[in-house]
Amino acid sequence: MRSKPRIKILLKDSYLQFIKNSVGSKSWRNFYALVGGRKKDIMQDGELSCASFVSSVLLMFDLIKKRHATVQGTIKDMKESGWYEIKELKRGAILIWEKRDFPEGSKHFHIGFAVGKKKAISNSHKHKSPQVHHITYGAKNNKPARKIEKIFWHKKLDKL
C-alpha cells in the first residue's frame, strides 16, 4: 500500500502570490461602521483602504490577530504578533510610507507590501484597489516621491 505524499504549505510563496493576485481587486474597498449612530463606509469607497487590504492579507496567513481600518492599528497588531523592524527590503516585507496630505485636510500614513525589484503593492486611492508601483512612488526633484518610514518583517516568512 502506497502512502500519500506529505504536503508542506509554502507560506512565503503562497503569501507573495496572494498579494500579487490581489492587484485590481475591489475586495477591500468598503468597510462599514456606525459613526455617531449612522452607518458609514469608513474606507470612503476605497480611498482609505490600505490598512484594510494589508491587515486582511496578514490575517488570512495568520500573521496578525484581526482586520484593521487604520495603519496605526495594523502596526500595533503586527508588533504584538511578532513583526519587527528591519533596515533592508525583503520580498514580502511590510512598508510604511510617510504621512501625506489628503484633500479634506487630514494626513495619513500608507501601508503596503514589498514585492521585489523596487516594486510594491498597496491600495491606490486613485484606483480604489491594490496596484503595483515603485517602492517610493518614483522620484520628485531626485528625491523619493514618498519616503519609506519603516520596514517590517516576520520570522515566519524566513521559512520555506
Image (cartoon, grey):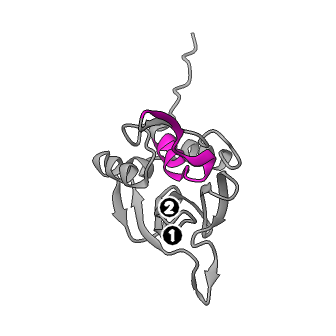
Magenta residues (range): 37-58
Where residue 86 sits, quadrant-wise, is: bottom left
Give the vertical position of 14 relative to 131 (above or below): above
On the image, the x and y values in percent for residue 28 come to: 59, 42
Residue 49 is a magenta residue: yes
Q: Residue at x 51, y 48 (%)?
A: 54
Residue at 64% across, 76% down: 138
Residue bearing mark 2? 110
Locate residue 79, reporting x and y percent: 31, 52
On screen, 116 above or below 154? below
Of all residues shown, which one is farthest toward the bottom? 141
Which residue does the image show at 48% across and 34% down from the upper left? Answer: 38
The residue carrying mark 1 is 100
- Mark nearer the viewer, 1 or 2: 1
Q: Nearer the viewer, residue 90 or 78?
A: 78
Residue 158 lies in the magenta stretch: no
Local SS, label 1: strand
Name the residue nearer the viewer: 62 or 49: 49
* Residue type at tag 2: His
Residue that sits furthest to the left in the current view: 80
What amino acid does circle 1 point to?
A: Arg
x and y percentages locating residue 136 in the rendered image: 57, 73
Residue 121 image position (x, y, % from top left):
61, 57
Cβ atoms under marks 1 and 2 closer than 8 Å: yes
Q: Which mark is residue 139?
A: none
Report the residue at 61% width, 90% height from top: 141
**What is the C-alpha distance between the residues marked 1 and 2?**
8 Å
Could you tell which of marks 1 and 2 lies nearer the N-terminus? 1
As helix, strand or loop, the secondary structure at mark 2 comes to strand
> Along the line of sight, which residue is nearer the eye, 116 or 106?
106
Q: Is residue 39 above or below residue 93?
A: above
